[in-house]
Image (cartoon, grey):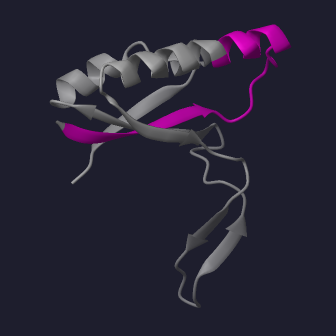
């Protein structure tokens, strides 16, 4: 089995704030999905990420450090990551197709680790 890093990408701020019940249900969906991966031996780990961060970029005068997150066109952020075991990319893709992130307009990037 190979290990795959899944970057969870999400909209940077939503126009509609979910209700407490919608949030609770979404969390339950995540738990059920992860429990299934764990039971089948695919789960290696993962975490959600806070909204605090710093970005460091090289400049001619030295590193430039800015507060906040790296945002792609101000529209999306990396909200978390997962580590999954799969036999190949096709299996990793199949495992991710039922991920609850898609219920909230998120998407994923799958990368094989070395």
For the point 55% across and 25% down, which residue is it?
106
Q: Position of residue 100 (x, y in %)?
A: 53, 16
Give the left or right position of residue 8, taking residue 15 as reference: left
User: What range is drawn magenta here?
Assistant: 2-27
Q: Is residue 3 magenta?
A: yes
Q: Position of residue 63 (x, y in %)?
A: 58, 82
User: Vertical placement of 12 versus 53: above or below?
Assistant: above
Q: Quadrant of residue 64?
A: bottom right
User: Vertical placement of 15 versus 2: above or below?
Assistant: above
For the point 69% across and 47% down, which residue is it?
50
Q: Quadrant of residue 114?
A: bottom left
In the image, 105 versus 23, the foreground residue is: 23
In the image, 113 versus 57, the foreground residue is: 113
For the point 15% across and 30% down, which residue is it?
87
Q: Position of residue 57 (x, y in %)?
A: 55, 73
User: Vertical placement of 79 versus 39: above or below?
Assistant: below
Residue 19 visible in the snapshot: no
In the image, 73 versus 3, the foreground residue is: 3
Q: Quadrant of residue 108?
A: top left
Q: Is residue 21 magenta?
A: yes
Give the left or right position of residue 3, taking residue 75 as reference: left
């Amino acid at each position: 089995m190979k290990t795959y890093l899944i970057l969870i990408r999400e909209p940077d701020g939503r126009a509609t704030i979910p209700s407490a019940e919608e949030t609770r249900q979404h969390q339950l969906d995540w738990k059920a999905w992860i429990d299934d991966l764990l039971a089948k031996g695919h789960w290696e780990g993962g975490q959600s990420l806070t909204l605090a961060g710093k970005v460091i970029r090289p400049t001619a005068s030295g590193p430039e450090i800015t507060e906040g997150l790296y945002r792609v066109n101000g529209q999306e952020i990396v909200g978390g990551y997962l580590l999954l075991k799969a036999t190949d990319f096709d299996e990793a893709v199949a495992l991710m197709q039922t991920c609850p992130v898609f219920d909230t307009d998120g998407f994923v990037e799958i990368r094989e680790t070395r």
